[in-house]
Image: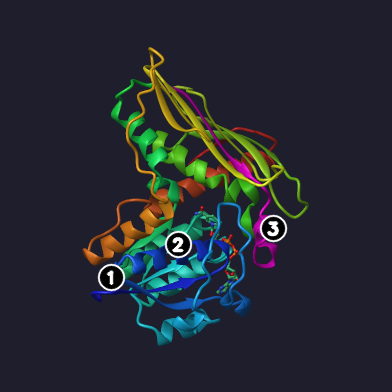
Amino acid sequence: MSKVLRAAMIGIGSMGRGHLDNYLRLEKEGYPIKVVALCDVDEKKFTNYKADFNIGEVGADGYDFASFNLYTDLDEMLAKEELDMVTIALPTYLHCWGTCKCLEAGVNVICEKPMAPSVEECEKMIETARRTGKNLMIGQCLRFAGQYDTIKKIVSSGEYGKAYSAFFFRGGGTPLWSYENWLLKREKGGGALFDQHVHDVDAVNHIFGMPKAVTTNGYTVFPESAYDCCSTNYIYEDMMPVNAQNDWTLKGNGFYQIFRVNLEKATVWFDENGLRVIDTEGKNVTPEYDTENFYYTELKYFADTLLAGGKIDRATPESARDTVKIALAEMESADKHGEIVYIK
Ligand SMILES: NC(=O)c1ccc[n+]([C@@H]2O[C@H](COP(=O)([O-])OP(=O)(O)OC[C@H]3O[C@@H](n4cnc5c(N)ncnc54)[C@H](O)[C@@H]3O)[C@@H](O)[C@H]2O)c1
């Protein structure tokens, strides 16, 4: 491993630009990392424009594209560059393709969520990482978010007793920016259910473990899409109510993420007023939590692991594959008008 990590970005659309901002922030802070190359099939992406995105400004300061080696072909980039790591922010249907090529070329990979559209592709990515001995992490970024980390710790530690019920919501305006409009095509993006709601599926998986079954109502607004609005009940052995909803057809600008978990001795809220832990006497007992940009924390965790010569143990591909399993069961349930689907 080089003393300075040589990195590349593959796919520099909206999310790719968000990641590039964090790489450049690390560089600016003197962290031993350098983005040497960018790869995108669409040359227009090698120009400064204000990327349309629903989760905040990206590329705000403009990029000096002359400072990177630019490629429109992934094979050419892998043949010409000596890389330690890449971030893959390709459309979801290309995650397995891009990830396996990079791993086979001996490069460590952070690949965006959702891991891949099928469990078979997820398994192929896991097998390739094991065989090549390279690190593969999936950008299930809520695992690095202070609010979600706090509720995970509260539930796992039993500090406030057993959880009684949980609700998660995520949503905002419709994503109209994507390459060939892949985000609004069922076979490429899987709609809000598979693309955006998957964050809450991962939170449910991480906090409460694999449910035994799901039942999902899905509503499709855009003809080629699938389930632009959805609501899932996760069924656990003890029948504790756990529900997650998503809707990416909300009016007005904005992006919302909300949860509420009620436990024996506290209720935990997270919404536009921040995170609040309220105890049985109604007192606010919110602990200190990390409010850093979680994409930055995620990237730094991966780079720290590589520099230490270690193996990642957060947002692992195995856990991200399980999240895909749950989301696919939800899709099947929605296809069957809310039938209960058991997860194998
Ligand atoms: N973690 C998060 O919070 C979060 C948020 C948004 C998107 N995402 C994920 O990030 C990924 C990208 O989403 P996006 O919104 O940036 O989409 P996008 O369409 O804006 O970007 C994808 C980019 O990939 C490029 N591309 C397509 N085919 C290519 C190929 N064969 N070789 C090289 N480049 C190619 C496109 O030109 C485009 O620039 C998706 O998996 C999405 O689910 C994650």
Q: Is residue 224 above or below residue 204?
A: below
Q: Which residue is mark 3?
A: 176
Q: Secondary structure at mark 3?
A: loop
| Colour scheme in use | rainbow
| Position in image of residue 284 (x %, y %) | 39, 22
Lower position in the chain sequence, tag 3 or tag 2: 2
Q: Which residue is mark 1?
A: 32
Q: Secondary structure at mark 2?
A: strand
Lower position in the chain sequence, tag 2 or tag 1: 1
| Position in image of residue 292 (x %, y %) | 38, 49
Is 119 on the left-hand or right-hand side of 182?
Answer: left
Q: Is residue 51 above or below residue 287?
A: below
What is the magenta range?
163-187
Residue at (33%, 31%) from the top-left corner? 287
Q: Is residue 179 magenta?
A: yes
**What is the three-letter code of the residue carrying label 2?**
Cys
| Position in image of residue 11 (x %, y %) | 53, 70
